[in-house]
Image (cartoon, rainbow, N blue to C red):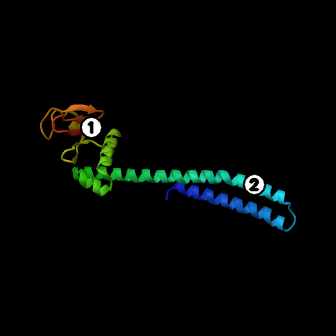
Amino acid sequence: MNNGRIIGIVLIGGAVVVCLLGAAVTVVPMISGDLSPAAMVLGLAVAGIVALPLVAIGVFMIVRGGQEAKTDVQAAKQRRLLDMVSSKGEVSMNDAAVELQIPRAELKDWIYRLVGLGVFSGYINWDDGVLYSAQASQLRDLTNCKKCGGEVKLAGKGVVKCPYCGTEYFLD
């Protein structure tokens, strides 16, 4: 459980305590005859007004904590992908998708995102489905495809592509 969720739960618990204290302070004197019903309603309303923002902020923190937890899980999986490729030198896209338990299309998006962040350099042939790790310095002066020997062309920011076999090279 992350901090956002814990804070949210504590705030909602605080709101419950405020409501219980408000009820105790107003209901008990009313039962004993020391407080009018109108004063009791006013006391409960004040307790509710104090508790309502605590509940709202608590719910917000719980929802946000859930979103952060999902982001943390995704970031951990992306780190695992980087570790897999860098330690093995090459990884099958199918193996990576199975190990990370994500669809292949999402894996492709992650690869482009990691390239955009500048944390991955290497190349991939989408037809073969194999992701290769390589030093960016080896790829900067690349003019011909390592797979088919065709001339590579700039395909986007940090991406060079072979128009013949479809291999994409990712530069830092």
38 vs 120, nearest the viewer: 38
Q: Secondary structure at mark 2?
A: helix
Query: With respect to residue 153, does 37 lie above or below?
Result: below
The amino acid beneath tag 1 is: Leu
Q: Which residue appears farthest toward the right when viewing the image?
A: 34
Residue on which the image places disc 2: 45
Judge the density around disc 1: few (<14), some (14-19), many (≥20) Cα neighbours within 10 Å: many
Judge the density around disc 2: few (<14), some (14-19), many (≥20) Cα neighbours within 10 Å: some
The amino acid beneath tag 2 is: Ala
Q: Secondary structure at mark 1?
A: loop
Label for residue 171? 1
Name the spot of residue 14 as percent of width and height, x first: 65, 58
**Count of all numbered marks drawn on residues in the image:** 2
Q: Are marks 1 and 2 in contact (CB under 8 Å)?
A: no
Identify the residue at image location x=26%, y=32%: 155
Counting residues from the start of the chain, the first of labels 1 and 2 encountered is 2
